[in-house]
Image (cartoon, rainbow, N blue to C red):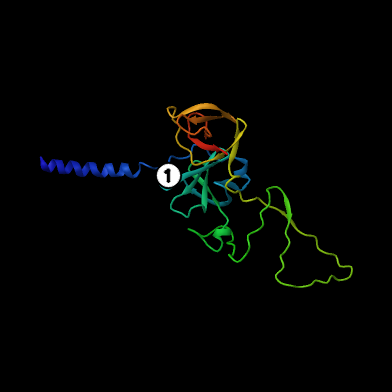
Amino acid sequence: MRIWSTVLMAVLLPAAGRAQAFQFRSPAPEVTAATAVWQVSSQPIVVQGLVYLPTRDYRLFDGQVMTQVGIYQGVPIYADTTLEVYSLVYVPVGGQRMRTYERMRDRELAGTTGSRSPSFPVRSPSLPAAEERVAGTAGAIVPSAVGPMSIVAAPNAVLPTRTTVESIRRPSGTNGIWLYFNGGRYYSAGAAVPFSPDRFTLVGQHEGFPVYRDKNGNANEIWVAVINGGGPVAPYVKR
């Protein structure tokens, strides 16, 4: 009898271990940006107040290491928990394919390379960060003086015109992802969670997507469905 008990435990314990290992696997994304204009036209995206630029790199979804870190225009955004935080995010583009978006390595990341070789040039720590401007506006780039000097213009010299550029301002903590609902502005406050009718109650809609409140939550917090039909809901907080 003891021999049979030992054999039975040897058979059952590995199976239980495997079940525990896969217990927290992230589900595959149900919404993709395959036809989204911003993804097709390779526009930058904003996730948790940081700007990420599109790359040509793609990888397959891996629920063992990928977890949802935000939502951009209704599309769930993922990060690899084994890589440097806030360096790369992944956008689902159809099937199991995820497009890589990378944060520019400037400011506090200047002079570093992170978990992998960056797709964009690494700014030197000795170089000042580019001046931020409001998105969609033009500003002049004027070289700063490096020491006392005088410039004498030649007679009838034609001074070159100053170059103007348009740039996207790096969002701060108060101007990240937000939406209007019932006359108030609500800001993204974390990753989406599975919808539960026992926890959430319907309070309205935002652009066709159901809006809920947590029955035991804060009155200034709402939960917006990522997809219609009982999918995940993402938290937003009124400020």
Q: How many marks can you see?
A: 1
From the viewer's perspective, tell me whether residue 179 is left or right of residue 134: left
Does any portion of residue 18 appear in the rendered image? yes
Q: Which residue is mark 1?
A: 63
Asked which quadrant contains residue 196, the reply is top left
Question: 190 or 90, which lies in front?
Answer: 190
The image position of residue 130, as x and y in percent, is 65, 58
The image position of residue 225, as x and y in percent, is 52, 33
The image position of residue 2, as x and y in percent, is 11, 42
- Image quarter where the N terminus lies is top left
Asked which quadrant contains residue 23, the reply is top left
Q: Is residue 13 above or below residue 146?
A: above
Residue at 30% x, 44% y: name it: 18
- Image quarter where the C terminus lies is top right
Residue at 55% x, 59% y: name it: 108
From the viewer's perspective, tell me whether residue 148 is left or right of residue 7: right
Residue at 60% x, 30% y: name it: 182
Q: Is residue 176 above or below residue 226?
A: below
Disc 1 secondary structure class: loop
Question: 92 or 121, which lies in front?
Answer: 121
Does any portion of residue 35 appear in the rendered image? no
Q: State the residue lying farthest toward the left.
A: 1
Circle 1: residue type: Gly
The image position of residue 191, as x and y in percent, is 48, 41
Determine crowd level at label 1: few under 14, some 14-19, many 20+ residues with C-alpha closer than 10 A. Answer: some
Residue at 18% x, 41% y: name it: 8
